[in-house]
């Protein structure tokens, strides 16, 4: 009979070890954010978690106004009357900005192209909240996109992470 106690102890330990095996599930990954419907908007809005913003390395930048064109130099006219030299200076006319000229500059990385070729940017409308805004790109210069349509100067736009927001919005990226 004395040999039975060690066998019972071993069987008990084995049962405890086996109880810890199986039935485990993979840890769930917390959501990075969610797409929410907004009445009157087909795009809705994206609300990220702090962790989601960190995962995609999200950064915003301020949309800048395109600087006004430089004024041309004044018009200098010299005449000689009766052997005397006369110089007159007339201010040049103020430069005009043609209609349809770019009015805002955003980082080129803020511009997102959808599969049909339409262009968008995401604006920051509140804490960790972003909304898609259609933009019209006039031209690209270096790392800047010059827009004729889009957010106003001073608006915060997503400069890094815009593609991930577009993926989250369209359902391409369930997790970021």
Image (cartoon, grey):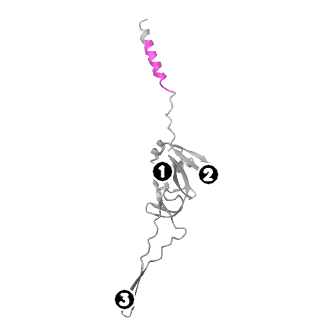
- Marks 2 and 1, Cα distance to the nearest angstrom? 21 Å
Q: Which residues are magenta?
A: 7-22
Q: Residue furthest top?
A: 1
Marks 2 and 3: CB-CB under 8 Å?
Answer: no
Write down the residue under mark 1.
161
In-front residue for pair 56/115: 56
Q: Nearer the viewer, mark 3 or mark 1?
A: 3
Give the secondary structure at mark 2: strand
Residue 44: give x, y in percent of width and height.
59, 49
Mark 3 vs 1, N-terminal side: 3
Give the secondary structure at mark 3: strand
Q: Residue at x 50, y 38 (%)?
A: 30
Write down the residue under mark 3.
85
Is 8 in the magenta? Answer: yes
Mark 2 vs 3, N-terminal side: 2
* Callout 2 crowding tier (Cα within 10 Å): few <14, some 14–19, many ≥20: few
Give the overall secondary structure of the magenta segment: helix
* Callout 1 crowding tier (Cα within 10 Å): few <14, some 14–19, many ≥20: some
Q: Specify the label residue 42 is tagged with.
A: 2
Mark 2 vs 1, N-terminal side: 2
Q: Residue at x 45, y 12 (%)?
A: 8
Give the secondary structure at mark 1: loop
């Amino acid at each position: 009979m004395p040999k039975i106690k060690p066998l019972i102890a071993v069987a008990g330990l084995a049962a405890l070890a086996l109880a810890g095996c199986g039935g485990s599930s993979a840890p769930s990954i917390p959501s990075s954010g969610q797409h929410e419907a907004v009445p009157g908007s087909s795009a809705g809005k994206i609300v990220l978690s702090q962790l989601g913003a960190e995962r995609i390395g999200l950064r915003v930048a301020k949309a800048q106004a395109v600087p006004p064109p430089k004024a041309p130099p004044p018009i200098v006219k010299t005449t000689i009357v009766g052997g005397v030299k006369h110089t007159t200076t007339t201010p040049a006319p103020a430069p005009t900005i043609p209609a349809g000229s770019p009015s805002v500059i955003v980082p080129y990385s803020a511009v997102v192209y959808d599969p049909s070729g339409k262009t968008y940017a995401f604006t920051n409308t509140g804490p960790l909240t972003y909304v898609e805004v259609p933009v019209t790109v006039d031209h690209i210069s270096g790392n800047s996109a010059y827009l004729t349509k889009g957010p106003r100067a001073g608006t915060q736009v997503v400069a890094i992470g815009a593609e991930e927001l577009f993926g989250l919005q369209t359902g391409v990226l369930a997790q970021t």
